[in-house]
Image: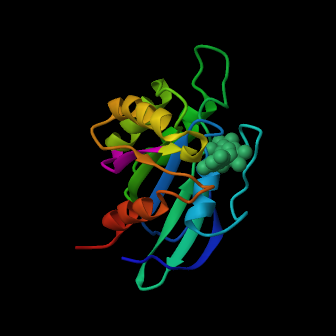
Amino acid sequence: MIVKVRDARYAGTIYESLPRLPQVAFAGRSNAGKSSLINALLNRKSLVKTSKQPGKTRNINFFEVDLVDLPSLYLVDLPGYGYARVPQGMKSAWDELAARYFRNNEDLRLLMVLMDIRRDPGREELMALDLARSTGARSLIVATKADKLIFSARARRMKEIARLSTAEPIPVSAVSREGLDVIWECILREIVPG
Ligand SMILES: Nc1nc2c(ncn2[C@@H]2O[C@H](COP(=O)(O)OP(=O)(O)OP(=O)(O)O)[C@@H](O)[C@H]2O)c(=O)[nH]1
Ligand SMILES: [Mg+2]
């Protein structure tokens, strides 16, 4: 199925009451490439702000997407974990925000857990997968910045990342645009009835 984006716009944050639509959310460490991937999926250069400095995205931002001949949805840009660290013993700001986002969220259909293809999976990725599971939403692992590695190194990394979950991780690049069609297929599978 060919996905054509008719229009995409910033719709607000978690704190505003937005019309209900299916949600597809993007989680990942700061700098993993969440905002870049959303822009790439929507063919937009800078709808979502990206940055070389980690921690750019500190809110939960909703982007409303209208597709040609397909249902509308929100792409949801979650703040990067590993940024909002607070003193030991306290819950991190990410935990607070995320807990609030995932709690009773019946509209979340799919959580993409992004990780830089060059990094090893850690506690945070597991935590995000657990949160998705608690809402009943599907989740998948997306290995970002695939353009950074040559073939052999990449195969090695994908094997490592595959240990995180039973679902096969998807390599993508916002630069070469590799994998974007696969991501759209996964999204459609969750939002198109039947
Ligand atoms: N080579 C390459 N660089 C990328 C890719 N995706 C993102 N980047 C770069 O990685 C950096 C971080 O990207 P962002 O999209 O801002 O990352 P983020 O996950 O939204 O980060 P936070 O908002 O801080 O949580 C930027 O310098 C991007 O240009 C990619 O596919 N390939
Ligand atoms: Mg971001």
What segment is highlighted magenta in the picture?
135-142
Q: Is residue 10 above or below residue 161?
A: below
Which quarter of the figure is the C terminus placed in? bottom left
Task: List x then y, in percent, for residue 112.
Answer: 45, 49
Any magenta on residue 136?
A: yes
Quarter residue 110 falls in: bottom left
Q: Nearer the viewer, residue 153 or 57?
A: 153
Relative side of 69 to 100, left or right: left
Residue sitting at the far bottom: 69
Task: List x then y, in percent, for residue 19.
Answer: 51, 71
Q: Nearer the viewer, residue 193 or 166?
A: 166
Any magenta on residue 121?
A: no
Residue 31 in view of the camera: yes
Q: Main secondary structure of the magenta part?
A: strand
Please tell me which residue is depicted at 60% across the width and 41% down the height of the picture: 148
Residue 58 in view of the camera: no
Which quarter of the figure is the N terminus placed in? bottom left
Please tell me which residue is depicted at 42% across the width and 49% down the height of the picture: 111
Task: List x then y, in percent, for residue 161.
Answer: 41, 33
Relative side of 20 to 61, left or right: left
Q: Is residue 119 above or below residue 176?
A: above
Please tell me which residue is depicted at 37% across the width and 65% down the height of the picture: 185
Please tell me which residue is depicted at 73% across the width and 55% down the height of the picture: 49
Residue sitting at the far left: 194
